[in-house]
């Protein structure tokens, strides 16, 4: 008969999983495990978010506000205040402006509009 190959010829190399840390299901895109985020990093991110929202609030062009955007802002500001916003509020201004061009849009998502309304409501309180 023929030659029998050595036992090593049938060996399969298996990659060890001990070299790699297990992947956690609770990770973000940045590779940070939830629960281990530095509180200072969170504070900085929150401040950046507040500044971004305030800039977007200041940059709301009343000539581009449509009925949909105005409805979202009015609803959120009314909900946050607990009463109808006063005439000098952002919500009242966009409502008045939207009657001139109801089909326009700011191009901002609803979440951003809601944050702008909450920021304005906090100024009113």
Image (spheres, grey):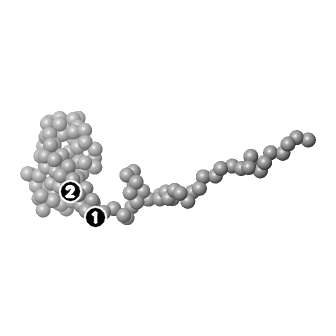
Q: Is residue 116 visible?
A: no
Numbered circles on residues, count? 2
Residue on which the image places disc 2: 47
Tell me the mark number nearer the camera, choosing from 2 and 1: 1
Q: Earlier in the sequence, mark 2 or mark 1?
A: 1
Residue at the (37%, 52%) spot, across then down: 30
Residue at the (71%, 50%) spot, across then down: 11
The residue carrying pointer 2 sits among few (fewer than 14), some (14 to 19) or many (20 or more) residues within 10 Å by Cα, namely few
Residue on which the image places disc 1: 39
Quadrant the N terminus occupies: top right
Q: Secondary structure at mark 2?
A: helix
Q: Position of residue 32 (x, y in %)?
A: 38, 57
Q: Position of residue 23 (x, y in %)?
A: 49, 57
Picture quadrant where residue 61 is located: top left
Q: Is residue 8 above or below residue 101?
A: below
Q: Secondary structure at mark 1?
A: helix
Q: Is residue 46 above or below residue 66?
A: below
Q: Is residue 18 visible?
A: yes
Q: Position of residue 20 (x, y in %)?
A: 51, 56
Q: Residue furthest left?
A: 88
Quadrant the C terminus occupies: bottom left
Residue at the (13%, 46%) spot, across then down: 58
Task: Name the foreground residue: 85 vs 120.
Answer: 120
């Amino acid at each position: 008969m023929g030659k029998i190959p050595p036992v090593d010829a049938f060996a399969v190399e298996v990659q060890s999983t001990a070299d790699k840390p297990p992947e956690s299901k609770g990770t973000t895109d940045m590779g940070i495990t939830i629960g281990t985020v530095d509180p200072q990093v969170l504070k900085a991110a929150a401040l950046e978010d507040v500044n971004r929202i305030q800039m977007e609030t200041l940059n709301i062009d009343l000539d581009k506000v449509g009925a949909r955007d105005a409805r979202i802002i009015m609803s959120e500001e009314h909900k946050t205040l607990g009463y109808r916003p006063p005439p000098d509020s952002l919500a009242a201004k966009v409502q008045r402006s939207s009657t001139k061009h109801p089909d326009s849009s700011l191009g901002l998502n609803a979440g951003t509009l809601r944050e702008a309304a909450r920021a304005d409501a906090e100024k009113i309180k």
